Image (cartoon, rainbow, N blue to C red):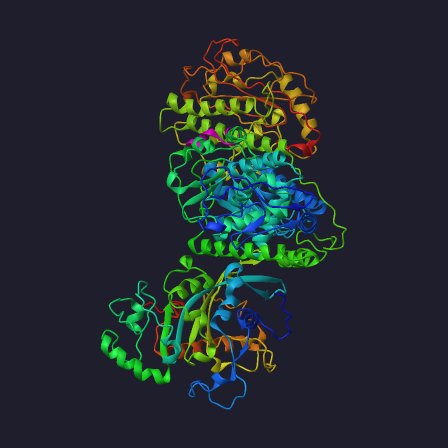
Amino acid sequence: MEDSQESLSPSSSLSLSSTFSSSSNPQPSSPSSSFSSSSCLSSPLNPYPLLIDAELWMMAEKRTLEMLRIIQPALVSEEKRKSIINNVQMLIKDYFGIEVFPFGSVPLKTYLPDGDIDLTALSHQNLEGDLARDLCSILQDDKHDSTFLVQDVQYIPAQVKIVKCTVNNIPVDISFNQMAGLSALCFLEKVDQLIGKDHLFKHSIILIKAWCYYESRILGGHHGLISTYALEIMVLHIINIFHLSLCGPLAVLYKFLDYYSIFDWDNYCVSINGPVALSSLPENFEETLENDGEDLLLSQEFLRHCRETFTDPIQARETRGHGFPIKHLNILDPLKDNNNLGRCVSKGNYHRIKCALSYGAKSLLEILTLPGESMGMGLEKFFVNTLNRNGRGERQDVQIPVPAFGTGRSEASDLSGDYDSYYHSLLYGQWYHNYTLFLSSQSSPLSSPSRSHKKSAWDALRQLVRSRRNFFYGKRGDVVFPSPSLCHPYAPQVPTTTFGIGEMEKSRGTGTYIPKMTQVYRSYRDMHAWPRGMKPESSNCELLMKSPEKSNKVKDSLGKKNAGNGSCVWTVDLSPEQFPHLPTIKKPMTMRMRSHHCSQPTVNTQQEESSSSSQPSYHGIKFGTYEPSLPIKRPDAGFSATTLLMMGIPTIELPEQEGLSESDEERVVVKLKPFELKDDGDFPPLCM
Amino acid sequence: MIFDSGSKQSNLDCFLHCTTPVVKSQFLPKNEIRNLNRLWHPGGREKVEYFTLGDLWNCYDEWSAYGAGVPIVLNNGETLVQYYVPYLSAIQIFTSHSSVHSLREETESGDGEIRDSLSDSYSDESECDKLCRWDGSSSEDGGSEQDCLWHVNERLGYLYFQYFERSTPYGRVPLMDKINGLSQRFPGLMSLRSVDLSPASWMAVAWYPIYHIPMGRTIKDLSTCFLTYHTLSSSFQDDIDSAGRKRKEGEDIALPPFGLATYKMQGNVWVSGNYGRDQDRLGSLLSVADSWLKQLRVQHHDFNYFMGIRRG
């Protein structure tokens, strides 16, 4: 292992160098060329060290930045994609009442002009297939908005169900419940913030993606090539290890090619912290963190926190037992144990990828040894297809002309993402799924809802909430997330025997607005009827009794708030006789709960009239005081779960035993704080 | 590559053009012209040009890494570039005995696909070996095989090297890697010159699609796979290139395919329009490939697969 010296002497020369930890070097051991780790820009192909003049290097990076400007997200492309996303979100919300979140390169702002838009809809997991098919029909038929041209709608019924289409000539992929995508988004955004250096991480991703896609054609998980996320982790690995000597995206690109072209894929896999011997897998994440990390940019603690924060404990548990599947290209997912990001790469493609990396490294090295202007031209040739396609005054994803390459008129755009928003989407998704999991466990007629089963769902929820507490929100640990809709077929299920249109119509008396979709989805009542025996016996659920004036008050405020976008408030009756449960404001829980026999958690939402920071009176809220021994009643009494989806502050309560007082410790709720929004656009509207 | 397509250029033409290797040409020293096999190189030429196989493989270097781009025009006028990766599907190199005498090595046929014909590797019962008959005699009899070869030598030359790929496409390495690997044991693969090769020398390259840019929707016809057949000897070099222009001396030598087979071709991208010219062309290229293989009496695994012929 060559141990190298750092030699950054800006006055004379700039070098690409790196310091190596003593961790195993997975490079093939040829004496003079084990790694491009010598103090100057060198590579196994050219064992003699090269000095690149600092000025020349700066020029090269400058040229690279010019190229980046024409392919990285621009104001016009941002606007266009945003409007498409909003349109699809609203469409799906209108029809299905579920939330849709963007993930991947669009929110991360690392998309290429040819890149697609990735969206994931959060729904009940069993209904994904039906939902997808319906969505297809709707997209094909939807002619409501003439400014959005929807074409080529396709349903891919693979393991991950996707609805593909193009909207205004941009490919859009709509998947379901892809929590991993939301996690990755938060993680990468956070990492970019941490690395800084004018978004070195994102710029490098864009540059390397461009090379892999336009020039060497090795990008594309669907094609058995490297997936984008895998590529991002590979880039992160490079930056993490070599950060001290990487002054710009071109340096990262070179290092990327050089490093991976001679990486010993047969015996090692890539992880953020360094190469990991395949023989030492299945990985133990904690173990990999023990690799000496002094020289690494990302601290162990940071990575650990990321894992805990961005990963759903339930899902994490699921994958843990499986063992790491070893394929040809092995890349460890930092957020998920035993997830091999390179698993989709086929053997043949693996060979070609290696070929491409070698060829690319060799070519780039030759270019970097050219003098002055030749180097500039060489760089342009290295990105010939990228420039041909995007540098002539046209972006593939935008209709209007943009500055061409070389005119010097391209503007740098801000690659900062809205981390808070992404994090909230993630939380929402995790909460939603844990909640539906809980509900499913409650409603299953097959097994007696064993204490442990319910407990595990609640445990997870509690754990989730706990883990969010201090990390990103400071000491108070206030977290806010809205409640999911329980009222729609694709939302967490409630017995649809109660869902009949008739009942719905009756409830109109209280002012709830039932949108047109109910007509469309009437059939779902039949399709998704719960098994017999789950008929609710509603008499016990006095939870639903509400004083009219309160409901009106709420209704009014709801109406006020929601009139604009035509959203509605859904409620579910347990029986036609009962009023729909509407949210209360500052109503003491105990009064309601005391007479409540049901063992369902209820999700109540409260609405703040203003987005002030006034604390709602969550009487007796104690955070994290869940008693595992709380006996939970069987849901013989049926469901009382009702929700009202709105902008606001939900609470999660444990159902309590009859007769317990509000001060009883057996209630655990989440302490919540109203989320302050600048405007509706700040957070995807969750109103229906 | 930026391809300046004339109005008559069809997608098929484009494909054939973009997958044609163009090799650097060299001039044979005068004193060597005498040594050329008269049968293969009828005399009378002042200058003889040739290329080395090593230079030929260099053409496939970038294609093997990045894929070769073929600009396609769809029926609705949309354009895109579809990329294909070349894989060595089959190759036979016949030389005059003397050319390779110095190159011949002792080889073990560890790989059942490779056969140095002068070693008795018929114990290896790989399918292609069995079927590789020269004069209709049984290949199981090692002895008669030898005799046949001597007969054949005069016509076809000495089989220095052959290879028939049989593994699935998903497991193959791109052409450049393959050749690099094979040339470890058969250095002639790099050093032999086109003038050393008998006119019977040929190779088949399999082209498998990667993806197209822009990606857009899936176009079935773009998942077509191709098999191009190329001669390797100087004897057959066309002096007229595909645009009808006569090749000048010293210019690079093109090796356009003389035969073509396709797999999973639907037709709408490749043979639409053009007054049926493409259809005819496809047909004739296919039949040439077929008769070539028959003439040499070889079974080409990929060809059979593409044609839907499955053998035991």
The residue closer to the viewer here, A666 or A317, is: A317
Q: Nearer the viewer, residue A41 or A683?
A: A41
User: Would you place residue A465 above or below residue B75 in this image?
Assistant: above
Q: Residue at x 67, y 25 (%)?
A: A676
Residue A580, above or below A527: above
- Count of numbered circles on the image: 0
Is B126 displayed left or right of B34 in the figure? left
Q: Is residue B244 left or right of residue A28?
A: right
Residue B4 x, y percent position in the rendering: 65, 70
User: x and y percent of residue A539 in the render?
Assistant: 47, 18
Task: Name the residue at 45% across, 61% down.
Answer: B177
Q: Is residue A105 above or below residue B284?
A: above
Q: Is residue A316 magenta?
A: yes
Secondary structure mainly formed by the magenta segment: helix
Q: Compare residues A158 and A581 and report the one nearer the observer.
A: A158
Q: Nearer the viewer, residue B91 or A38?
A: A38
Indicate whether residue A4 is drawn in magenta.
no
Residue B311 at least partly seen: yes
Q: Whole-percent x and y of residue A157?
A: 47, 48
Residue A189 position in % (x across, y down): 60, 36
State which quarter of the image contains the C terminus of chain A: top right
What residue appears at the point 65 percent right and 32 percent down from the top-left corner? Answer: A683
Q: Is residue A91 visible?
A: no
Q: Which residues are magenta?
A: A308-317
